[in-house]
Image (cartoon, grey):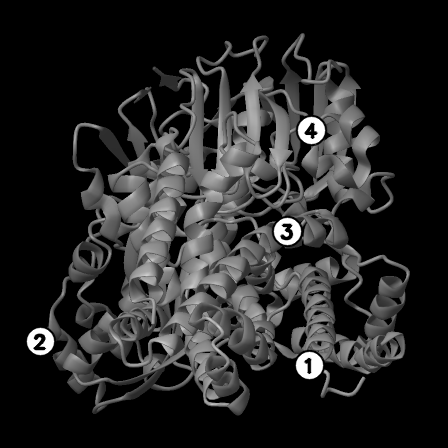
Amino acid sequence: MGGYILKRLVSAVPVLLGITVIVFLIMALIPGDPATAILGSYATPENVEKINRDLGLDKPAVARYFIWLGNMLTGDFGRSFSLNRPVLDEVLERFGATLVLAGTSFVICSVLGIVAGAVSAARQYGLADKAITFAVLIGISIPSFFLGMMMILAFAVERRWFPVSGMYAIYGGGDLPDLARHLAMPAVALAVVATGVIARLARSAMLEVLRLDFIRTARAKGVPERRVIWHHALKAAMVSIIPVLGIQAGFVLSGAVYIEIVFQWPGIGRMLVTAILQRDILLVQGGVVFVAACYVLFNIAVDVVQSLLDPRIKT
Amino acid sequence: MHLKYWTRRAVFAATGAVLALGQLGSAPAEAQTPPGVLVVGQIAEPKALDPAAVTAVNDFRILMNVYDGLVRYKSGTLEVEPALATGWEISEDGTVYTFDLRDGVKFHDGSDFDADAVVFNFERMLNEDHPFHDTGPFPLAFFFSAVDSVEAVDAQTVKFTLNEPYAPFLSNLAYPTGLIVSPDAVAQHGADFGRNPVGTGPFHFVEWRSNEAVVVEKNADYWDGAPALEAVIFRPITDANTRVAEMLAGGIDLMVEVPPVALSEFQSDAYNVVEQAGPHVWFLILNAKEGPFADKLVRQAANYAVDKAALVNDVLEGTAAVAAGPTPPAFAWAYNDALEPYPHDPGKARALLAEAGVESPEVTFYVTEGGSGMLDPVAMGTAIQADLQEVGFDVSIETYEWNTFLGEVNPGLEGKADMAEMAWMTNDPDTLPYLTLRTDAWPDKGGFNSGYYSNPEVDALLEKARVATSQEERADLYKKMQVIVQDDAPWVFVANWKQNAVTSDAVENFQLEPSFFLLLDDVVKN
């Protein structure tokens, strides 16, 4: 097992290097530069040149790439010019906020999705199955930012149950209940689509398993139906559900961008959007590499968990 | 099958979840902000709170409450009055400005404001060898590129020597780039000064919680009288719809840049809507070098063809006024009241096209997706396209993201497009025409005259106005310039934006300034 994990980690290195090249190239090739973004209408060639010099952008691209990569390997992600602070400080802070949001959402969508899928499969074509399928279809079809906006109007403006936006109250607050109140709406809005997708796939995975011989054997032996579904079938179905969870974790993470904008969640998605518009090259590069690294690691973790669950997967 | 059992469990779970949510929601959604603390909904996170380092109006809104300049705009106007300087003298030839400084003013960190502090501020920005020049970059330092030297004559007197007469100098000092920072604080914080600002203004900085809030508190010793508010909290809320929702839910007391479509939400007694026209002009650059718009008649035809009233009233919901010429009326002293906007007259436009001998001229039109001061550029561009098609133009739109758009438009439209959207907000009537309408401001000479307009008469008027030191003389020259430019029609003059804001009814004494700055020292919150 240790060897397997090590092998996977080593194979992640070229992936991450590839990501640094891609994100660097994208930022180097998109039109517009930081100086123009800073100066706006005042961007004369002379002013642009001066700012680029101050930001160290007058060096050739290849040199800039290796300087950046070298610095990053020593833990120095550079300084964001648009925020006037070290990239890593900002990225860690914002990524923390995103993890709280996406993590909560992920738990919600995994639990609800798997339970709904399992119930659906157990009651195939029954009332519960139809109700769940219908709800899932609606959930998948509503864009999360729209749902978020509607939730704000309904539960923060009309009825002031929850705060409209932000992560903590602006005055007082800052404790866990405060965070929970701010987290409730964005986490649910973000979870809805993924819940639907997981429920659908969990349902078909369960249906497949429920047709297998060992389920029939279990039933024939008189194992209670509840135990057949939740113990025998679900455990077997998890092998095909878990990779879906891994993919959905990525979707939740990227879907967080919209939700972060609508709910003004101080997460990394919103940070990246702003940074791209301002051509804050180091912040975009640092942010993307960081998120990509986390995603790669998460997928490795999922594969490891899966191999633990399914003895057929050779490690 | 144990259907009953299952269903009951589901019902229990659901009930539990609803109860838990209700518990969470039953607490007050937002702790009430106490009286005297004003929460302002900003449009973005500030970049930095160092006035020399920033360029965005969003940042200026905070800065103007923390710092003072040597001079400032008189309330409700764009005319300069004393602030940290009590008075000044301008030499006969307009190249030496001597300021008397206010006595006994202290920075928030307790250090003295004096002539040395002024010298430090300008040296830091302008002199590449200054020990703290590396706390930049200072993108708008060129506002003071005419400054040759700054000297402290004595503790209370400072002398600026310019390399040539430069009339907008005083206006530029009133601009946020001219705000005075504490040298001690710069020395202490270095490059982090932008997150630890120290000035002399009505409020002093308390904390900056990234992406959450910037908090400033009352400066009880303010030289111009302590402000009425105890504290101001600036909250960045980038999404306009969310900003509106926060305002409706009571999470903020004041919001700026209300989207036109949301104004109707605030038509009750619980809110006050404030608006103020500013030094902004929204126009279409026409390529006067090649293509159909090389002909003045065709340029005039475009001005007649575009229904500006419909744009400002329907597309912009009344948040802008029809522009008559290149200078916004907010520069009251330099604006030519006699100027009438081109009326919407499709018949006249067709007649001019016929007279010019062009039939359905093909036009490439650059439209931006957004950008500072660009209002609603896609909707406006589409409406303009329809208006122009109506009189016989054949318009194809190309849309770009703002930074890409600037990268295409600023180097000049030649060989690419016939027409492009553009908007400017400036602080002096000199800036916009000087940078965009002179022959010497063609892109290859480092200016922003992307449509290659050229009229020697306009060039002469603008050069003369720049070196004139009396305001009357300058006003006269600008007024003449406006008449000529309107007739030459290098642009389609479209709109002057009215900035708006909404406050809750607890807020009193709030007004917007033509400068678009947000000044909060007189504001009261009950």
Q: Earlier in the sequence, mark 2 or mark 4?
A: 4
> Label 2: which residue?
B347
The amino acid marked with disc number 3 is Arg
Circle 2/circle 1 CB separation < 8 Å: no
> Label 1: which residue?
A310
> Label 3: which residue?
A94
Residue at 50% x, 41% y is A180
Compute the Cα span from label 2 to label 3: 58 Å
Circle 2/circle 4 CB separation < 8 Å: no
Same subunit, labels 2 and 4: the answer reads yes
Same subunit, labels 4 and 1: the answer reads no
Q: Secondary structure at mark 3?
A: helix
Residue at 56% x, 65% y is A253
Q: From the image, state whether disc 4 or disc 1 is nearer to you.
A: 1
The amino acid marked with disc number 4 is Val
Q: Secondary structure at mark 1?
A: loop
